[in-house]
Amino acid sequence: MKKLSTFLVAGLLLVGCAHHHNDAALQQHLVGTWTTRDVQLRSALLSDIKLKLGPDGSYFAAYSVNRPDGTVQAETLTGTWHVENGIFLETLTNSAGQPAQSNGGSKILKIRANSFAISNWNNPHRVFTRTQD
């Protein structure tokens, strides 16, 4: 019985630790320039996606919007970002040179040395790969 209770306590501690997020460490690792594969939306395909996350919390994204009618439009987004409770949070402040206000969040699924994966309502598993700054 004593071994069983020790095992259960140790198991509960491991489960609790597995869900603990060190937001500062996650945020520090995400600083840099990233790219990801194309993203298919209902009304367009996003391609040539580049994301720059600054150490000061600045956010810059650039990509092409490919519409079904064949038109292609370059898009840029700027704003701020941070990590809170293991969630990558972004606040959009400018879209294509126009003031904008939008908030979004994505659960961080996995972080490796040169990649990270997130999940959100639009894409349940998107992988970003680190590029040269």
Image (spheres, rainbow, N blue to C red):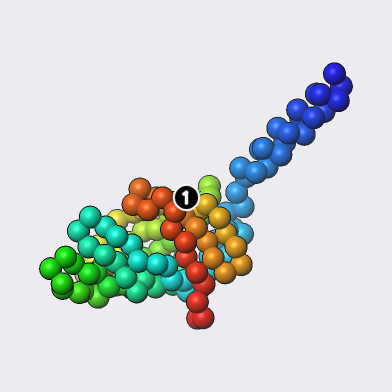
Where residue 46 appears, as percent x and y from the top left, is: 29, 66
Dividing the picture into quarters, in which one does residue 91 lie?
bottom left
Quadrant hosting residue 58: bottom left
The quarter in which the N terminus is drawn is top right
- Farthest bottom residue? 133
Q: Measured along the vertical axis of the image, is residue 110 above or below residue 12?
A: below
17 left or right, relative to 126: right
What residue is pinned by disc 1? 107
Residue 34 sits above or below residue 2 on the image: below
Name the residue: 46% across, 71% down.
Answer: 34
Q: Which picture quadrant has residue 76?
A: bottom left
Nearer to me, 19 or 45: 45
| Percent of width and height locating residue 116 | 52, 61
The answer to whether any part of residue 106 appears in the image is yes
Residue name at image x 18 percent, y 67 percent: 67
Please give left or right for residue 17 compared with residue 64 in the image. Answer: right
Q: Is residue 43 above or below residue 10?
A: below
Q: Position of residue 49 (x, y in %)?
A: 36, 71
Q: Position of residue 99 (x, y in %)?
A: 23, 66
Residue placed furthest toward the top: 1
Looking at the image, which residue sits at the far left?
Answer: 69
- Residue at disc 1, secondary structure: strand
Assess disc 1: are there few (<14), some (14-19) or many (≥20) residues with their C-alpha within 10 Å of its C-alpha: some
Residue at image position (47%, 65%) is 128
Callout 1 amino acid: Lys
From where the camera sits, is residue 97 visible? no
Tell how many labels.
Answer: 1
* Residue at the image position 33 percent from the left and 62 percent from the top: 39
